[in-house]
Image (spheres, rainbow, N blue to C red):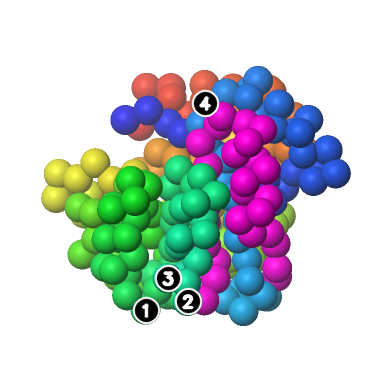
Amino acid sequence: MPVLINPSILGADLLHLSDELRALKEGGADYIHFDVMDGRFVPEISFGELLLREVRAFSDIPTDVHLMVTESERHLDSFIRAGASRITVHVEAAEDLSGILDTLEQAGVLSGISVNPETPVVSVFPYLDRVDSILVMTVHPGFGGQHFMEESLPRIRTLREEIVRKGSRTRIAVDGGINTETALLARKAGADTFVSGTFVFRNGPETVIRKLRELLEDPQVE
């Protein structure tokens, strides 16, 4: 399964977002990771479907909308209409996770489930055959620039073992403190999709994305 590099525009310079989006295209980003925070599920507030519409109108890079919000069900339709390619919801914030997955499937939108550091990864096992990806948070959600939590690595391994056991094609994404060193650790543990904001944008998406891909797709890494 090929590696996916999904920069989070939470780390972008929003005053020059069009330039940042061009740089993502030049670098070969697979998805734009779109962090939506409501000030309730996480302390911070970020942006919503209006900005997503503008991004989708400007860029043809697919978007992964990461809903760090309470009552995820209420927000699905607006982000579907705004052009989300994938919508990822938190297992901790979804009252009817099965219903959410049904809605996304009916809308033709890929689905993902995110799991916080304190939440056992076994909580997502029942949904592995229904989702495109599991997003393992490797920091506490809601703040950019945090350090990668190495205690996430056995969680990734456990999840990978279950995916292999079930014969599932579900991806494992990691989000939080991702740079060349931590991405390599996560890759060896079983991750195949990498979300990075601060590291990518501070060091130049045009070169960083390519370097990450080359490093992580090295056959000797797996």
Whether residues under marks 4 and 3 lie with C-beta atoms below 8 angstroms apart, the answer is no
At mark 2, the secondary structure is loop
N-terminal of the pair, mark 1 or mark 3, is 3
Disc 4 versus disc 3: nearer the observer: 3
N-terminal of the pair, mark 4 or mark 3, is 3
Q: CA distance from mark 2 to mark 1?
A: 7 Å
Q: Which residues are magenta?
A: 44-70
Disc 1 versus disc 3: nearer the observer: 3
Q: CA distance from mark 3 to mark 2?
A: 5 Å
Q: Is residue 121 above or below residue 57?
A: below
Q: Extreme right residue here?
A: 15
Tell me the number on the disc at residue 95: 1
At mark 1, the secondary structure is loop
Q: Specify whether residue 146 is in view.
A: no
| Residue at 64% from the left image edge and 59% from the top image edge | 48
At mark 4, the secondary structure is helix
Nearest to the observer: residue 80 or residue 66 = 80
Q: Is residue 174 above or below residue 143?
A: above
N-terminal of the pair, mark 2 or mark 4, is 2
N-terminal of the pair, mark 2 or mark 1, is 2
Q: Is residue 64 located in the magenta-colored stretch of the structure?
A: yes
Q: Which residue is label 3 attached to?
A: 73
Tell me the number on the disc at residue 71: 2
- Residue 46 image offset from top left, x and y in percent: 70, 62
Whether residues under marks 3 and 2 lie with C-beta atoms below 8 angstroms apart, the answer is yes
Disc 2 residue type (three-letter)? Glu
Disc 1 residue type (three-letter)? Glu
Mark 4 neighbour density, 10 Å: few (under 14) some (14–19) many (20 or more)? some
